[in-house]
Structures are given as C-alpha cells and as structure tokens.
Amino acid sequence: MLEVSDLRKKLDIIRQQAFINIEKINDLYELQVTKTQYLGKNSAINDILKSVTQLPHQYRIEIGQLTNKLKKEISDKITIKFNELEKKLIDEKLKDSEIDLTLPGLDFSIGHRNPLLKTVDDIANIFKNLGYQIVSGNEVENEEYNFNRLNLPANHPARAMQDTFYLDNNSKEVNRWLLRTHATNITARILSKQNKNKQKVEAVISLGNVYRKDNDDATHSHQFMQVDGFVVAPNITFANLKWTLNHFCQQMFGLETKTRLRPSYFPFTEPSVEVDVNCPMCKLQGCSLCKHTGWIEVLGAGMIHPNVFTAAGLDEATAGFAFGVGIERIAMIKYGIDDIRLFYNNDLRFLKQF
C-alpha cells in the first residue's frame, strides 16, 4: 500500500529537480524536452496522479491537490523561462542586424523629368506670360481642317510633301479622317469659331503630338511634338511677328541669342519665313552642330494667308500671324542632344542628366 508520506516526499524531490533543471536550460528545444519530461503523459507527476485512486479518500484529495499545484508551479516556471529565452534570441538577432547610423545612406534612384516635357512647359510659360491661350486640341482630324482650310486643297503640290497616316486608306470619302500632320489644324478650327462668335482678337498656342510617315532616325520620327501659335487682331503687322519670334528665342535660349529671318514658303502663310538662331556651341564661329554656318533653324512663321481667313468665313482683309515650332528640335538645341530617339527610349542614364 502507498504511503502518503512517500508521495509527499516524492513530489518535493520532483519540484526541486524540476526547478534546478529548468533554471539551467539555455535553448528553447531543451526547454520543450524538459516540459514533456515533467508534464507529459509518461511523466512522474502523471504517474502519481494515476496512483491517487489507490489511496484512502481523505488522502486522495490532499495528494491530488499537491500534485496539481506542482504541475502549475512547473508550468509557470517553464513559461517564465520560455519568455527569457525568446527575448534573448530576439536580442541576439537584433544585435546581429544592428544598423550603424553613421554609415552613409543608400542612394535610391528617383524619377527624372524628360527634357522634352520640360521644354513643353518652358514654351507654354513663355507664351502664357504674353497672354496667349494654351490648348491641346484633337490629334485625330479630317482633311477639311488638316488641309483644305489651311490653303492645302486636294490638288495642291505641297500636300504631297506630308506623307499622312490615314485611318482608312481604302475610304472613298472626300473628307477622310487621319492623324494630324501638324498642330495647325487647331488654328483652322479656332478661326472658324471666331467667325461664329464675331471675336476680334485671338492669341492661341496649340501643342501636342503630330504624325507623319517618316523613317525613324537620329533627326526624324513618325511621331513628334509641335507647338503652333497664331495671333489675330486689328493692325497686326510683320513687325509684331518679328518681335514675338525674337522674344521667344531669347527667353528659350538666353538673352544674348540673335535671330535671323530667311524667306521661305508655307501654304498657310504669306509672306513666310524660316527663323534661325545663332549656334549655342560656336557663337557664329562655325562648328559641326551648325554645319559651319553659325546658324541653326528653329521654326517657321509668317503672316496668315488671306485664303485661310476666307476658308474660315472671315474677311480676307483680317490680319494675323502664325508660327510653328518643333519641340524636339528646340530641346535638342537647348540641351545639346544629337538623337531624337533618346527622348522616347526611357533610358535612365539619359534622363538622370536632366
């Protein structure tokens, strides 16, 4: 028969051994093994609980309570030890990954603005400061506003100069739809609205993509950007145009910039001129950039042709001037870029320079 005093002594020995063993443990795996040893199904404590049924009733309750109390004490001791070991493990990991705040920071690459978009903003701001209205307009246009109303009827020889993207080449319609070949289509549309609204003064800049069937190379692209501007107002003369072009070039390339106007031909202006600026590289001395002439062509301009006013329903005596600027060309000159394709390749090595 079991002696109650022996069970009490056995529980006390288990307590002492368990506390000593738990205190010595240095890793979580060993702690788990010790937990199984003292609290598992085959543990000495569990054996004592099984033997309690052999005791008289009055001792059965006492030994049962002592055994359950010991289980709780060991469980609490294991929990405390577990928290200590886990904290120690976390501290070691943090120490290994400790950040040295004295080290230089990482250089994270950030986006850079495309110089083409910066040029668009620069041009728009120059004319906005002069009181011009800035519009974008539609890139899908019909022949009426892209050609006919700009003094480019179907039999006009200059029309063959612009190889056009038609949206339906097989269409037999007289007024076919196309991707606009210049931003001047907006000029034709606004002048027509001016007739309806009986407006007397208009100063507008239209900008956006235009499309022509060019072979892509260092200086040509099937898609490029253009700014087209015009002013219609009483008493407008060629002198007003000349001042505007000179002001634009100086604001864009620097106040020391010189301009030169050469006679040219555009169907929607008469007289027409090409505008050159002095080469920013050689300052009129001659270099490979300006082909040793000292001058670089930047835009075309002229007084609006009377036929354009007539097509818009305006009096042919109406006065106004117009000009067109290739944005890529301006950006290439301003930033010394020798290949138009660089604007569209999204090469970070190129963009980071700006």
Image: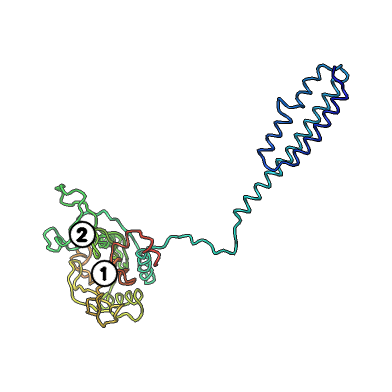
- Residue at the image position 32 percent from the left and 71 percent from the top: 336
**Left or right: where 295 falls relative to 69:** left
Res 133 → quadrant: bottom left
- Residue at the image position 78 percent from the left and 37 percent from the top: 19
Amino acid type of the residue that numbered disc 1 sits on in the rendered structure: Phe
Instruction: Look at the image and tell me in which quarter the N terminus lies.
Output: top right
Pick the front one: 207 or 134: 207
Pick the front one: 266 or 34: 34
In this rendering, the answer to whether 51 lies above or below 279 is above
Specify the color scheme: rainbow
The residue indicated by pointer 1 is: 323
Pick the front one: 337 or 140: 337
Residue with the most extreme bottom position: 285
- Residue at the image position 27 percent from the left and 77 percent from the top: 277
Where is residue 10 shown, x and y percent of the image?
83, 28
The crowding category of the residue bearing disc 1, from other C-alpha atoms within 10 Å (few below 14, some 14 to 19, many at least 20), is many
Res 302 → quadrant: bottom left
Specify the label residue 206 is tagged with. Answer: none
In this rendering, the answer to whether 75 lies above or below 201 is above
The residue indicated by pointer 2 is: 215
Where is residue 296 shown, x and y percent of the image?
25, 75
Instruction: Look at the image and tell me in which quarter the C terminus lies.
Output: bottom left
Q: Tell me the distance, in whole angstroms, between the alpha carbons under discs 1 and 2.
A: 25 Å
Determine the secondary structure under disc 1.
strand
Where is residue 240 shown, x and y percent of the image?
29, 76
Where is residue 254 shown, x and y percent of the image?
36, 78
Pick the front one: 144 or 163: 163
Amino acid type of the residue that numbered disc 2 sits on in the rendered structure: Asn
Determine the secondary structure under disc 2.
loop
The crowding category of the residue bearing disc 2, from other C-alpha atoms within 10 Å (few below 14, some 14 to 19, many at least 20), is few
